[in-house]
Amino acid sequence: MLGKTAGGLFWMFRYLERSENTARLIEAGFRIALTRADGDDDEWTSVLQTAAVAHLYFQKHEQIEAAKAIDFMLRDMSNPSSVLSAIAAARMNARLVRTAITREVWEAVNDTYMILKRELARPVSARDLPEVLALIRQQSALVRGAMHGTMLRNDIFDFCRLGTFLERADNTARILDVKYYVLLPSISQIGSSLDNVQWETILRSVAGMRAYRWITQGETSPIGIADFLIFDTRMPRSLAFSVGKIATNLGYLERAYGLRHPCHDQIDVIAARLTHGTIDRVFEDGLHEFITDFLTDIARLGQQIETDYRFLG
């Protein structure tokens, strides 16, 4: 496969996943904001920082306001990680690789772009926000369904999956960081009812509440939730699950092409850390520090995949 085509597939699915993940990040911030009695907008600074777009926001706005932050992350085309920007970029990449994807996948991507462009044509009110975020998640699921139901399991499929799970791993780590590092008002709140409500909000934002309660028979604890989202390979948005899928698809590419690249060594190291790590050790060393290191490793892996498979030509 041409490197340019592989890159188009990879980034098409990274952007599709990013659109859903941005919606989930907005939902996490929105729900946690509801737990604040003072109605302060400061938590949106944390959400923007977690999405790595705070500097872009402050180029347009002097101060943080919830409505402006939500609009910036949903609709602003000057923000490359906004939902609308990500969907537009996914559609552009889909057009470039139309001969490599099925008609059903192309139609699902194109329909998603058209629907969300219409829904996001104007600012979304707080009352309508949950419904719009649900629509974004639904459209993302439709594209994934088309991919799983119609595409051959070959190198094309592998590059699609790599884009999906690199972006997903990055996002779950960032959502965890929103909660633990910045959104808790003070150290005195740790273990409080507010702390537990915010942790449960994080679970809801990654569609993990019911699964977590099923596994734990209803018991909820911050360390248990963090363990679930980092190490549990049964949870499809956990770090361990996402890294495992990246390793699997890179392994398929290694066998298909008969070549082993530096990215294969990198994913082996990342996977080994998650396989042998424990949540007690993570909390002992610092959850924020663990997440920062993980995000750095995932970013380097993405860059190495681009280099090894010559996405730029």
Image (cartoon, grey):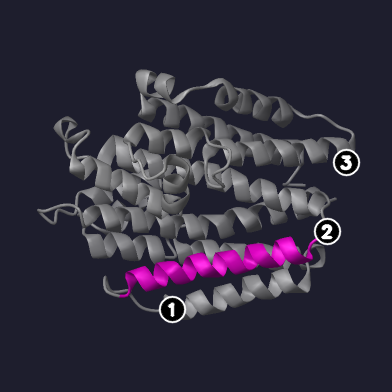
The answer to whether residue 83 is left or right of residue 88 is left
CB under 8 Å between discs 1 and 2:
no
Q: Which residue: 27% across, 63% down?
A: 68
The answer to whether residue 148 is left or right of residue 112 is right
Q: Which residue is mark 2?
A: 152
Q: Which residue: 39% across, 40% down?
A: 176
Nearer to us in this view, 249 or 211: 211
Spatial separation of the CA atoms under disc 3 and disc 1: 42 Å
Region of the chain picked out in magenta, as a range: 128-152
Q: Where does the image place residue 27, in percent across and percent down from the top left?
A: 35, 58
Which is more foreground, mark 2 or mark 3?
A: 2
Residue type, mark 2 in image: Leu
Spatial separation of the CA atoms under disc 1 and disc 2: 32 Å
Is residue 135 within the magenta segment?
yes
Q: Which residue reaches farthest bottom?
A: 118
Residue 119, numbered circle: 1
- Of pointers 1 and 2, the one earlier in the residue sequence: 1
CB under 8 Å between discs 2 and 3:
no
Let me know if residue 18 appears in the view. Answer: yes
Q: Which residue is mark 3?
A: 256
- Of pointers 3 and 1, the one earlier in the residue sequence: 1
Spatial separation of the CA atoms under disc 2 and disc 3: 14 Å
Which is more foreground, mark 1 or mark 2?
A: 2
Classify 144 as above or below 122. Answer: above
Nearer to us in this view, 300 or 111: 111
